[in-house]
Amino acid sequence: MNELAYKFFNNSDDCYLIGDYLPLFMNFYNDQINLNQINQNYLLPSYRNNYNEEFIYPGDEFVYNLDKGFVFKKIYFKENYKDVQNHFEKDYLLFLGTGGSLPTKNKTVSSILMKKDEDCMLFDVGEDTINQILRLYGNLDILDNLKFVFLSHSHADHMLGLCSILRHVSHRNQSITIFGSEKIRQYCDLFSRNYKFIYANPSTSKTFENYTLEFSKCQHYDDSVYLKLAYNGKIITYSGDTRPSFEFVNLSHNANYMIHECTYLYDENEEAFNYNHSTILEAIDDFKQSKAKILFLTHFSQRYKIDDYLKLIDEKNENISIASDMFIYFLTK
């Protein structure tokens, strides 16, 4: 290993040297473990008893021999996992992926799972959604009760994971229902025919079993829409990717829960404007104008750590949460 590479690894946050050996990666879940110690709403993955030495698991480390140039040891960090599978009786919102653009080791891309009684719903299905479910629950059983998927728009970081979901539920007698645009329907046809598609056209609403879904035009991409989900007198709104918007403020008026993207930090207004996204302060301003009760901030730029967003939120404001990967919030009845 040349001197430059040696210095890089020795000073990297992700690698370190032990004698003559270099573990190639630090634990993927360091940030998650730290967050969990502060607030247990940030979940740890479930431990799986069927550990296989031939597979690579999140949290594994590899030891590399600097002289001989080969990996000779894999370390499985069982202590970073819960001893039992995650299982929750209450209704909840679970943020599976919360990063923008591309998945990284700390944040995968957009996907939110909602559980209501026995029903399961997904808002956006970015790449690796199905594996996030597997990491958190230890199995994919919850998808047996998947009622519908809402896709806010046809950008890859919000829909690439749909093919894996469709493949997994293809055995069911009951087809899955997907709400989205024509572009998304064409994408679905590449992978499955066992689904029912309902167009999420702006300024329309659809009733689906015990839920009412209302859609509104969103300023981001040509097929972007906001979602307003009403059930049992409760309202959840979801922005997808967006600029700050009176349309979304109006849709979220007095909502119980508002989910708003905040891709950029407070001082990046120009970038947010150029790419049709929101800063964290713009998202909070929309929330205040809407008079919604609870705000979940999500869809974070991959260039920043979650700490960069957390430090901008007043600890006394219990109505605002930084909903990063594996964040769970239990819904009131």
Image (cartoon, rainbow, N blue to C red):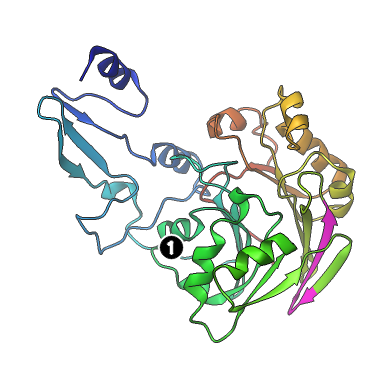
Question: Which stretch is magenta?
Answer: 207-217
Prevailing SS of the magenta stretch:
strand
Left-right relation of 280 to 125: right
Q: Residue 274: give x, y in percent of width and height.
A: 76, 30
Q: Nearer the viewer, residue 63 or 316?
A: 63
Q: Quadrant of residue 245?
A: top right
Residue farthest to the left, as pictured: 68
Q: Amino acid at mark 1?
A: Tyr
Please check the rendered image and state whether residue 34 is part of the magenta-colored stretch, yes or no. Answer: no
| Image-quadrant location for residue 203 | bottom right
Secondary structure at badge 1 equals helix
For label 1, the crowd category at 10 Å Cα-Cα, with few meaning under 14, some 14 to 19 and many 20 or more, is many
Q: Is residue 215 magenta?
A: yes
Could you tell me if residue 88 is visible in this image?
no
* Residue 19 seen: yes
Question: How far from the left and from the top, in percent, is residue 63?
Answer: 19, 35
Is 330 left or right of 83, judged from the image as shown? right
Task: Return the residue nearer the eye: 33 or 62.
Answer: 62
Q: Tell me the quadrant of the picture where the C terminus can be found.
A: bottom right
Residue nearer the viewer, 201 or 322: 201
Q: Which residue is mark 1?
A: 137
User: Horizontal placement of 90 versus 215: left or right?
Assistant: left
Please provide percent x and percent y for residue 251: 86, 54
State the residue at coordinates (60%, 45%).
323
